[in-house]
């Protein structure tokens, strides 16, 4: 075996080893796919293989339907608050916290009410009658909630008016305490300008 | 044993330090003043011993210690074992007290001789605050408390905390909260010693910028963590704990602007002092919100019964500070009056109005459940729509003022001056608005935001161009050198402009969320779904399959998605579901999601694996396109860079000016008393 064939053989062996190693690695990392390879149906999606341990993937989910992505349905769910404690709206919770059992139930209820022919406001009203106003993401603009909606505006508005009045008063006072007239300054000479330039340079260095 | 002993010793040292500091400050006794100073150093040493002891227990996995069992497990990575120090209630309180004592020691060491007159009171205040935290630890949240038995393994850290962002985000926020205590201590010292001239402001300048910088970085890291970890596709949700960190930041930002008026004109003494006191109270309020669980938050992992301690401390502090403040009001008279509504002072005041207005709004809406329950018996929670209703317009007004402020002269601006200053920035704003309208953008708030952002950038650019040209003309420096020296010679002013640039980037990035696009899909292997980006191109997400494997402390279920843009493959994304387990393989928490994110300057692709259908490889995904998210992180970096420039030692002309107080007031400013 000459040097060239030795190098080629060694390179081939290394490549094969790497390929085997890669396959082994992938195999180690994807036991489900390795075990269920025949059931995979690329590229167009047929029967899907079974996972080795489905419990690890969290709560089993239902397939997504067109209704789940309906902007109108999502708009309603964004007006409703999930009560699982997350503080999110129903849509965001059901598409984020996949362990939550409340938001999928609310979602199904919204779908059912929509299928019964209710409009968005009627669906929200139905939720309020069943769960109370705490189900709403935005509390109704009445009663004490008005303080939350308009109190900050009122406070900032009043503060702005107060600030403008104070500024006017202060500027009036400053005008009264200022000297009656300021004599016009003569134009600086070139020597004076040079002096200022040197002083500035010294100050900044 | 050593740790708890150190806490008790620290408590005794703190009590002595507070007593010696107050007495030494009041009587002028040098021995007591020295002793108070040494007490702060001793406090730092003993608390560091306690931290060392707790870290030792964490790394040794001594599960007989309640805190170690609650926050770690045998298979917790070392990286997160370190951060377990502040992952839980008790450890974070120890962290707070320790960092406070270290900052206090630094204040003792680094304060210039001419400001040391404040130090006895400063040491007393630092010791008092430390006493509070030590009391909470020893009374209700002892990090060294032991269990009656030793479990074979710990519970492990909450999966949401096992993220690199959470290793740096909490300490940064804490550093921000805690470092506010030093300027606060100087403010209290100034009030107690009745030395309320400009000296105390000079003493705290670096500290205020430092705490503002830490808070800024901490808030940005928190946004990043929320974005990559929580999986809802956003970075800010007006959550009470987020708000708690935002409140002191707003007040500190207001202070950093209004203090310039006091330094230059001797005005707003009462206001500035009030802002510093408020910032500290809000920093304690922030810790209270985070720690008590009094208001429902996604940060529920921090809830515990220490709320009553914080309530008493907060209420007591507010009462004492109010009394102290009111009794010193006669000493806080202004030395000059504002001369014109069209002046930089006036714009700074409106800037303060906006910042404090936003702070008041955020505070009111955050505590609204408590307020509504107190007044009506019903808990009413105000959600993001209510926050946005006020804060979006106020934020945009603030953005406008960010551009207007630097363009208006101090004292009084003339019409020719205004025309000359505003021409370029206004043109930039108008052109930008016209540009985005021509491109088809029709949403009102984004158009206004982009127009105002261009206006502010026009202001900043004009300031830099004029400064560089002036240096080039006067000193003959080449432009790059002139640019560098312009910043280096006046770091406060030009560092401030860099901060403004970062803020503009953040505002523009926030508009991206108005164009967010998302869809859910359940895909069998080989199936795909398409989403059209706001930029006009189409992304196709093709599901390849689901794999399962074990990692160090978790069992992973991962979906593999090939992403292509207009038919051209751009990469692979692998979102995960993670089931965390202890060293015996037993599940410790609910399965969590690990989002896959692909970022570029235009948009983020954000893929969440919700789970699988019927235990098969049919995966349920949420696909989201989030425009401009990278600019949030870049904007945060630029803000931090500006902050570093501002606080870099030396070189600021302003410091020379302030060191002499505002004695060099212009002749027209007549000293007025009785205001």
Image (cartoon, rainbow, N blue to C red):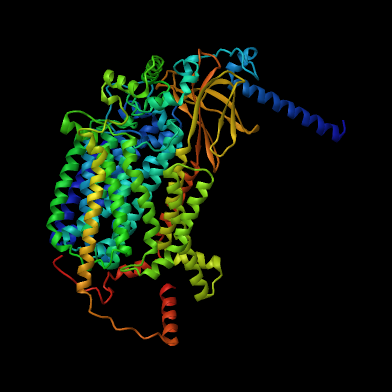
Q: Position of residue B526 (x, y in %)?
A: 62, 20
Residue ID at (47%, 68%) = B467
Residue ID at (25%, 48%) = A156
A99 to B216, vertically: above or below: above
Q: Position of residue B221 (x, y in %)?
A: 42, 42
Q: Position of residue B549 (x, y in %)?
A: 54, 21
B568 to A98, vertically: above or below: below
The quadrant where residue B302 appears: top left
Left or right: where B269 falls relative to B226: left
Q: Which of B337/B194 is in front?
A: B337
In which quadrant is the C terminus of chain A drawn?
bottom left
Is any part of residue B193 visible from this angle? yes
Q: Position of residue B655 (x, y in %)?
A: 35, 66
Is any part of residue B74 visible from this angle? no
Left or right: where B205 falls relative to A34: left
Left or right: where B28 falls relative to A187: left
For the view shown, which residue lies furthest in the right direction? A2
The quadrant where residue B258 appears: bottom left
The quadrant where residue A126 appears: top left
Q: Which of B238/B455 is in front?
A: B455
Left or right: where A32 falls relative to A65: right
Residue ID at (39%, 62%) = B406
B282 to B587, vertically: above or below: below
In which quadrant is the N terminus of chain A drawn?
top right
């Amino acid at each position: 075996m000459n040097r060239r064939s030795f190098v080629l053989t060694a390179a081939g062996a290394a490549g094969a080893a790497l390929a085997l190693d890669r396959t082994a690695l992938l195999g180690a990392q994807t036991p489900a796919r390795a075990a269920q390879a025949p059931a995979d149906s690329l590229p167009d999606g047929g029967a899907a293989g079974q996972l080795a341990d489905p419990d690890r993937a969290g709560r089993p989910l239902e397939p997504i339907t067109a209704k789940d992505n309906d902007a109108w349905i999502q708009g309603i769910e964004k007006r409703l608050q999930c009560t699982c404690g997350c503080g999110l709206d129903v849509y965001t919770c059901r598409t984020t916290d996949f362990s939550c059992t409340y938001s999928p139930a609310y979602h199904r209820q919204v779908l059912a009410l929509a299928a019964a022919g209710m409009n968005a406001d009627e669906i929200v009203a139905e939720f309020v009658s069943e769960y109370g106003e705490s189900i709403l993401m935005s509390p109704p603009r009445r009663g004490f909630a008005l303080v939350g909606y308009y109190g900050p505006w009122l406070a900032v508005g009043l503060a702005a008016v107060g600030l403008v009045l104070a500024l006017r008063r202060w500027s009036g006072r400053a005008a009264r305490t200022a000297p009656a007239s300021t004599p016009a300054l003569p134009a600086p000479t070139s020597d004076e300008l040079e002096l200022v330039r040197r002083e500035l340079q010294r100050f900044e260095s | 044993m050593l740790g708890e002993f150190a806490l008790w010793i620290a408590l005794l040292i703190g009590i002595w330090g507070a007593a010696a500091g107050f007495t030494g400050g009041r009587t002028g006794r040098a021995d007591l003043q020295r002793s108070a100073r040494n007490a702060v150093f001793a406090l730092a040493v003993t608390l560091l011993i306690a931290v060392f002891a707790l870290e030792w227990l964490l790394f040794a996995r001594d599960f007989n210690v309640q805190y170690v069992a609650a926050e770690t497990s045998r298979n917790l990575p070392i990286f997160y074992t370190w951060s377990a120090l502040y992952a839980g209630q008790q450890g974070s309180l120890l962290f707070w007290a320790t960092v406070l004592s270290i900052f206090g020691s630094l204040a003792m060491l680094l304060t210039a001789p001419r400001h040391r007159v404040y130090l006895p009171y400063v040491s007393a205040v630092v010791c008092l605050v430390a006493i509070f935290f030590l009391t909470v630890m020893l009374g209700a949240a002892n990090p060294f408390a032991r269990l009656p038995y030793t479990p074979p393994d710990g519970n492990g850290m909450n999966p949401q905390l096992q993220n690199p962002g959470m290793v740096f985000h909490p300490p940064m926020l804490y550093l921000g909260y805690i470092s506010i205590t030093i300027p606060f201590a100087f403010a209290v010292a100034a009030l107690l010693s009745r030395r309320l001239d400009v000296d105390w402001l000079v003493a705290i300048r670096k500290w205020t910028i430092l705490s503002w910088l830490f808070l800024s970085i901490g808030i940005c890291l928190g946004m990043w963590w929320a974005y990559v970890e929580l999986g809802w596709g956003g970075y800010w949700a007006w959550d009470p704990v987020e708000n708690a960190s935002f409140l002191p930041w707003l007040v500190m930002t207001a202070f950093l602007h209004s203090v310039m008026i006091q330094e230059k004109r001797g005005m707003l003494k009462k206001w500035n002092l009030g802002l510093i006191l408020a910032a500290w109270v809000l920093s304690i309020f922030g810790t209270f919100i985070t720690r008590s669980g009094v208001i429902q938050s996604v940060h529920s992992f921090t809830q515990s019964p220490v709320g009553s301690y914080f309530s008493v401390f907060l209420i007591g502090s507010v009462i004492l500070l109010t009394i102290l403040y009111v009794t010193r009001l006669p000493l806080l008279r202004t030395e000059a009056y504002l001369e014109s509504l069209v002046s930089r002072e006036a714009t700074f005041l409106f800037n303060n109005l906006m910042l404090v207005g936003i702070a008041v709004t955020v505070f009111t809406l955050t505590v609204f459940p408590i307020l509504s329950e107190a007044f009506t018996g019903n808990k009413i929670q105000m959600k993001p729509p209510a926050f946005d209703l006020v804060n979006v317009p106020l934020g945009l007004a603030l953005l406008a003022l960010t551009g207007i402020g630097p363009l208006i002269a101090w004292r009084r601006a003339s019409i020719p001056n205004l025309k000359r200053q505003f021409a370029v920035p206004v043109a930039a704003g108008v052109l930008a608005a016209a540009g985005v309208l021509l491109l088809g953008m029709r949403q009102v708030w984004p158009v206004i935001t982009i127009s105002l952002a261009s206006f502010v950038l026009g202001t900043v650019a004009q300031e830099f161009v004029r400064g560089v040209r002036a240096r080039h003309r006067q000193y003959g420096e080449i432009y790059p050198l002139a640019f560098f020296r312009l910043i280096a010679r006046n770091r406060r002013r030009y560092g401030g402009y860099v901060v403004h640039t970062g803020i503009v980037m953040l505002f523009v990035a926030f508009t991206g969320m108005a164009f967010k696009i998302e869809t859910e899909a359940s895909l069998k292997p080989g199936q795909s779904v398409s989403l059209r980006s706001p930029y006009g191109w189409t992304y196709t997400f093709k599901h390849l399959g689901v794999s399962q494997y074990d990692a160090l402390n978790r069992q992973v279920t991962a979906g593999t998605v090939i992403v292509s843009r207009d038919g051209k493959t751009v990469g692979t994304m692998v979102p995960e579901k993670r089931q965390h387990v202890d060293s015996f393989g037993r599940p410790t928490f609910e399965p969590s999601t690990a989002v896959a994110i692909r970022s570029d300057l235009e948009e983020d692709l954000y893929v969440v694996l919700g789970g699988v259908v019927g235990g098969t490889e049919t995966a349920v995904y949420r696909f989201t396109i989030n425009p401009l998210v990278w600019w949030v992180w870049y904007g945060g970096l630029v803000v931090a860079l500006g902050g570093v420039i501002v606080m870099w030692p030396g070189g600021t002309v302003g410091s020379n000016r302030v060191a002499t107080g505002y004695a060099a007031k212009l002749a027209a400013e007549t000293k007025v008393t009785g205001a």
